[in-house]
Amino acid sequence: MLNWVVEPLNYEFMRNAIAIGIVVGILCPMVGSYLIVQRMALLGDVIAHSVMPGLSISLFLGIDILVGAFVSGILGAVTIVLIRSQSRVKVDSAMALTFSSYFALGVMLITVLKSKIDLDSFLFGDILSITTTDILRTTAIAIVILVAIKLFYKELLFYTFDPTGAQAIGLPVNALYMGFMVMITLTIIASMQAVGVILVIALLVGPALTAYLLVQELHHMMLLGAVFGVISSISGVYLSYFWNLPSGPAIVLMSSTLFLLALLFSPSQGILTRSSPTRGWFRLRASDRG
């Protein structure tokens, strides 16, 4: 049994994959928890697909793809805001339109600009090709985001549960919203090489949703979600090594398995364990408000 754990560590590509899996596994649920409690999980998917035009243009111009991906992702988020504020279109419709439009634009630009991009790796990830430079860059992005969450936790918490009240007491809600969009975009950029654009939303939402079924406070949800994210990433990498599976989907399926177990056996909300029907709403306790 111990040999199964140690054997993959003899290879540098496996050590790199596990290292970045841990970083991404911590980062994604931390940010994804806010998406869930705001009921905006689809926003992560929209931004994930919105980075595609930026990647194509970056490759064509020969600049760092992270720059193009970041700009394109932010533009996608701004597009949703503009559609909502300037028309009667609802947010879900605005997201669907932005999602499809940016993704189509990205595919078209890849063809027109003849960008040399590996679509399989881009869409589904290639964690086994991660280099030390990738790990350092992803870790740096993760540290910046986690420090920002720590510094502005109370403001983000208030804005998340009561945006109208946050505005009433003078909090800069527009700045908080844009800062949140930046965090989501950077998280997706940091994670897309590991699990790919299509699957990154599953890592953003899956571990956090699992924690959502088990705890009732936001900070507990974030911490427990990070634990589930790390478990999913490491176990997915090991499965890909021993069973010759694609690494990104293996990570996501492990995350989905943990969610299914929580859905069935959660002490308070599990389908098989709860003694009476429960509404299952996320509750904000006084400890989080303070």
Image: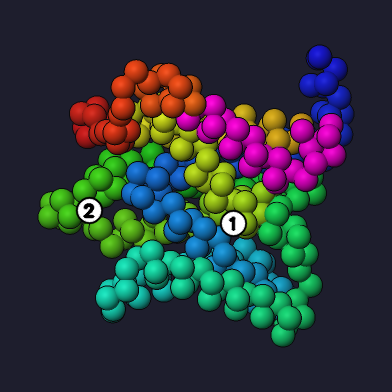
Point out the image quarter for the C terminus. Answer: top left
Q: CA distance from mark 1 to mark 2?
A: 27 Å
Whether 7 is drawn above or below 259: the answer is above
Q: Residue at x 54, y 27 (%)?
A: 261
Q: Is residue 224 visible?
A: no
- In depth, the one of 148 and 266 nearer the eye is 266
Q: Residue at x 67, y 75 (%)?
A: 107
- Look at the image and give the residue range highlighted in magenta: 239-263
Mark 1 sits on what residue?
189
Q: Which residue does the numbered mark 2 point to in the structure image?
A: 163
Give me the disc on residue 12: none
Q: Residue furthest top?
A: 1
Task: Tell me the residue at 24%/29% (across/down).
Answer: 285
Q: Secondary structure at mark 2?
A: helix
Three-letter code for the amino acid on which mark 2 is drawn: Pro
Coordinates of residue 242 in the picture (x, y in percent): 84, 31
Which residue is nearer to you in this view: 130 or 278?
278
Q: What's the magenta bit mostly, secondary-structure-wise?
A: helix
Q: Residues within 10 Å of mark 1 (few under 14, many from 20)?
A: many
